Amino acid sequence: MRDPARIERITRMLKAIWLQAPDQRLGQLLENYILPEMNEEHADSSWEIEDTEVEQRLSRLVERGLDNRDD
């Protein structure tokens, strides 16, 4: 069973990132900042991306900010 606490961690980080780009819709935010790096590894299938990977990516974005991302 996946850790239910991940939901709060992930949504808290997502909120912090989204507040850096409030004019973007959620889909834009995900496509522009969160999924590109992971889709390279998973052949365009967000269904296969584990929450731990999303959480790691979000964590890096929160630490560095959207203007200083590593991709």
Image (spheres, grey):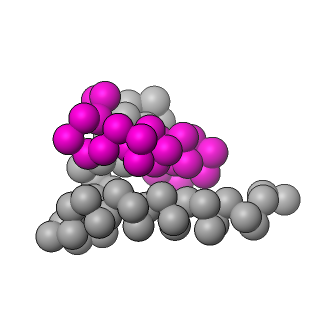
Please give the name of the residue rendered at 15% of the width and 70% of the height, measured from the top-left corner. Answer: 23
Q: Quadrant of the C terminus?
A: top left
Q: Camera-side residue: 45 or 23? A: 23
Kindly tell me whether residue 50 is visible in this rendering: no
Q: Quadrant of the N terminus?
A: bottom right
Query: For residue 29, which quarter of the picture?
Result: bottom left
Q: Is residue 62 magenta?
A: yes
Q: Residue furthest left?
A: 23
> Can you give x and y, in whole percent of width and height, for residue 7 in the image?
63, 66
Horizontal placement of 36 versus 67: left or right?
right
Query: For residue 3, which quarter of the picture?
Result: bottom right
Kindly tell me whether residue 4 is visible in this rendering: yes
Q: Residue furthest right?
A: 1
Numbered circles on residues, count: 0
Q: Does residue 64 sit above or below 29 in this rendering?
A: above
From the image, give the main secondary structure of the stretch colored magenta.
Answer: helix
Please give the name of the residue rendered at 75% of the width and 66% of the height, measured from the top-left corner. Answer: 4
Q: Is residue 55 magenta?
A: yes
> Can you give x and y, in whole percent of width and height, for residue 55 in the image?
55, 48
Please give the name of the residue rendered at 62% of the width and 68% of the height, measured from the top-left corner. Answer: 8
Q: Camera-side residue: 4 or 18? A: 18
> Magenta residues, as a range?
46-71
> Can you give x and y, in whole percent of width and height, for residue 16 in the image?
39, 61
> Can you give x and y, in whole percent of width and height, for residue 62 in the image?
41, 47
Horizontal placement of 11 versus 6: left or right?
left
